[in-house]
Image (tube, rainbow, N blue to C red):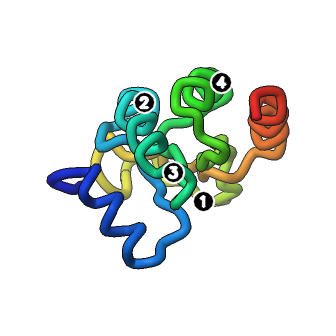
Amino acid sequence: MVHDPLVALETLISLGFERVLTSGCDSSALEGLSLIKRLAEQAKGRIVVVPGGGITERNLQRILEGSTASEFHCSARSARDSGMKFRNPNVAMGASFSAPEYSIKVADVAKVRTLNAIAKNIL
């Protein structure tokens, strides 16, 4: 959400930031991959550029290889039943396009392990 990401990167560096989490100014890290790579190249080790946004076990390898990133951020979540006992099928909390009413997203250990294994093979 910056006007000029290359200028913004230099500002972060000058302010002493050590990392910047970015989707490459796009809707996902995969879609913003070219900018993430450009930012990492410009950073030259002065700040760690961390790709994030929509990273999954299906696209992590491509993102790490395409960005030259040494770190990444993802939620690695899965949906599971909320355990809520009373359920009223006639009432929905929120808009119809929101998450399913009786499920919650939680960190998925298997996904974390898979993502970690993928990263270890690349980094």
Q: Is residue 95 left or right of residue 13?
A: left
Circle nearer the N terminus (2, 3)? 2
Q: Is residue 117 left or right of residue 48?
A: right
The mark closer to the camera, 4 or 3, is 3
Residue 31 image point, x, y percent: 37, 27
Give coordinates of residue 26: x percent, y percent. 30, 38
Question: Is disc 4 surrounded by few (<14), some (14 to 19) or many (20+) residues within 10 Å?
Answer: some
Q: Nearer the viewer, residue 2 or 99?
A: 2
Nearer-the-camera pick, 43 or 97: 43
* Residue positioned 65% across, 47% down in the render: 71
Q: Secondary structure at mark 3?
A: strand
Residue at numbered disc 4: 61
The residue under label 2 is 33
> Which residue is at 28% across, 60% downward?
8
State which tag comes first along the sequence, 4 or 2.
Answer: 2
Which SS class for mark 4?
Answer: helix
Q: Residues within 10 Å of mark 1 (few under 14, many from 20)?
A: few
Rendering coords of residue 29 (x, y %): 45, 36
Residue 68 picture quarter: top right
Amino acid found under the numbered disc labelled 2: Leu
Position of residue 77 in the picture relative to residue 26 (left or right):
right
